[in-house]
Amino acid sequence: MIFSLCLRYSAAQDPSAKPDYFQEFQNKKGAHERFDYFFSIPNRYLEDSAYDWQAAVNVYHNNSQKIKDSMSITKYELMQSQLYYDIGDFSKSVAIANQLHKKIENLDLPSKNILLDLIDNNYAKLGLYDRQFEIRNEKKNLGLTDKVIFYDIYSNLGLHRKAMDDYIKDKLKTIREDDYFGQAEYQSNVGNYLLLDMSIPTALTYYKKAKGFIDVYLNDISKEKTEQEISSGNLLKASIEGNIGKCHALLKEYDIAIPYLENSINLINEYNKGKFSSEKVESTLELADCYLQKEDYVKAKEYLLNGLDPVKIENILRSNRLLAAYYDRIGDYKNSVDYLKRNVRIRDSLNRNESSMKKQQLAAVAGQEIEYSKKMMEQQKKDLEQSRSDLQAKEERINIVFISLIFTLLGFAGLVFAYLKSIKNQRLIADQKRIIEASLVEKDSLLKEIHHRVKNNLQMVSSLLSLQTKNTRSKAAIEALEEGKSRVKAMALIHQKLYQNDDLSVIEMQGYIESLINSVQSVYKKGGHNINITIDAEGVELDIDRAIPFGLILNELVSNSFKYAFPEDDENGKIYIHLRKNGGQGYFEYTDNGIGLPEDTDDRANSSMGIRLMNRLVNQLQSSLNIDKTSEGVRFWFNFK
C-alpha cells in the first residue's frame, strides 16, 4: 500500500519557507502517527539528513523496548530498515527486514506491503535475484499484487531482450493514452532494456519519447498534483535525461551528453535529497568520462573526487578505471597503477564466484517461473473441471425438465423435438469447430516447419557461396558472390522471423530491419564503420509477399551506403530509414548524408545490377523507385500498396 498525503499550508504562511518535515515528525504522538507520516513524505531529507532521522528513530525504538511495546518496536524497526536502505546500507536494511519477516503474521496489511517491498528492493540491490521471486509470490498470496513478474529479474541476470519482450506484453495494452506518466515510464523502461542490450540508437528514440510524455505530465496544470506525484515525476525525468546523456556519450556526442547528465544530477539532488541513488552515481561517472574524453581534466577530477560512494560492483570498477585513466593522463602513474590493481583484485574475486552464481540464480529463477506457470495451469485446469461439472449438472437438470415437459405437455411434442434437434446440430457444429481448430494448429506447425527448413536451406546456399568465394581469385566475382550471399541472408531472415512469430501471416518490420542492419553491419564493421542509423518502423507489419522484396531493397541500399557513401570519414555518417503503412497505403524512405550519387547515375542505372534489381523489386510492390540527389547524400523513396 502506498500512502499519500498532500501537505497544505495557510495563505498567511510565507510561500518561500521550506516545510520542516523532521520537526513535524517529532511532534507526532506515538509510533503509529510517526509511522504513517514517515512513509507519506516524498522528500523527507529536504532539510535534515537521513542520519538525523536515524538518530531520532533509534531513540524512539530504545524507549519502546524499555516499556516492551511490541507493536511500536515493529513500526520503528520498519523505519530503521527504510533509513538504512535510503543511505545505501542494503545489507543492514535487509537484515532488519528479515527479522521482521519472521513475525509478519502480526502486521497489518499496509505494514506487510512496506516490509515485503523493502526486502524485494534490497534483494535487487544485493543481486539475490532468485530470492525476489519468493517475496513476490508471497505478495500475490496476500492479495497485494495481481501476479508475479519476472522481467526485471531476467534483465538483472543479463537476459535483456527476454525481459523487454515480457515487459511489453505485460504493460503495452494496460496504459491509457491520456496517462502521460504511465506512457513516460513505459517508454523509459523499454529504452532501459535496449540500452542494456547496447541498441543505442533505438534506445535513444524511446528515451526521447519518454521525455516528451514526462514534460507534458509535469507541465499539465489542468490536473492538481500532490507533492508525492510531483516528486515522482521529476525523479522519472531525472532518470530519462540521465539515460539520454548516456546514449549520447556512447555515441561519442559528449557536448550533447553533458547538459542532460548535469540536469539529471540536479533533479536527483533536489527531489531525492539525502537518499542513496545509483542513478546519480552512474550519471556522475558518465560526466567524468565525458570530460576525460574532452581532455578537461579539472572538471573530470571534480566529478571523480566529489565524495561518490558507489555500491554496485560495476560502478566501483568503472570509478577505479576512470581514476586510473585520469592519473595516467596527468602523469601520476603510481596512483594510476594503484587503481588498476584495485580493479584486478575485484575482478579476481568476481571471476571465482560470479559466473557460477549467475548460472545458479538463472536456473533457480527459471525453475520458479516454470513452477509458477504449472501452478497457474493447474488452477486453470481445476477451474475448467469445475465449469464442466457445473455444466454437466446443469445439463442433467435440463434433461429432467425436458422429460417432465414431455409427460405433462404432450401437445408440444413437435416443439420439443425441434429443440432437441437444434441441440444436436449445435453439438455437431462444436465437433466440427474442434476438428477445424485442430487442423489449423497442425497447419501452423507445418508452416513453421516449412519456413524453418527454407531458412536452413537458404543458410546452406549462403555457406556454399562463402566456400565459392574462398576458391575464387577474381575480385569482381568475389564481390558478386558476396552481394548474392547478402541477398540470400536477407531472404533467410524473413523466414526465420516467420517461424519465430505466433502469427505466420505477417512480419513485424522494426525488429526485422534491426536484425537485417546488424547482419549487414557485421560485414562492413571490419572497415571501421561508425554510422548512426535511425529506424522508424514501429508497429508496421507486412506479409511475406511484400517483406521479401522490401528486405532485398533495404539490403541493397544499406550495403551501398556502407561501401560507397562514406569513403573517407564516417564519424558523422547518418542513415535514416522510415517505413509507414496506413490501411492499404504504404510509404518507404531511405536517406543518408554521404557523398551522394555520381553525375552519370542515370547512365549507370541501365548497367548497375543493384539499381536494376531494386527497380524490379519495387515493381513487384506495384510502385516505382524515386531517387532524389540532395545537398548532402541521397534519398530513395516510393509508395506501395
Image (cartoon, grey):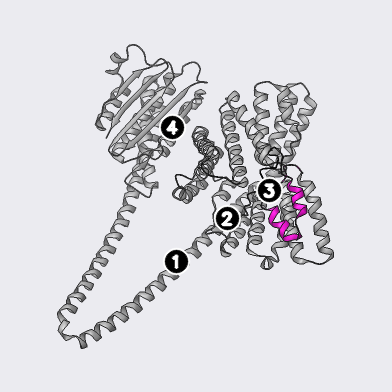
Q: Residue furthest right?
A: 66
Residue 353, which numbered label? 3
598 relative to 420 in the view: left or right = right
412 relative to 75 in the view: left or right = left
Residue 32 is inside the magenta segment:
yes
Query: Which residue was labeled with disc 2?
Result: 365
The one nearer the camera, 308 or 371, is 308
- Point 76% across, 31% down: residue: 305
Sequence order check, earlier mark of 3 and 4: 3
Give the CA separation, mark 1 to mark 2.
22 Å
374 lies above or below 258: below
| Image marks 4 and 1: residues in contact by CB distance under 8 Å | no
Percent position (x, y) of residue 154?
56, 49
555 lies above or below 420: above
* Disc nearest the viewer among 3 and 2: 2
Helix, strand or loop under label 4: strand
Query: Which residue was labeled with disc 4?
Result: 535
Residue 337 is inside the magenta segment:
no
* Disc nearest the viewer among 1 and 2: 1
Percent position (x, y) of residue 19?
71, 44
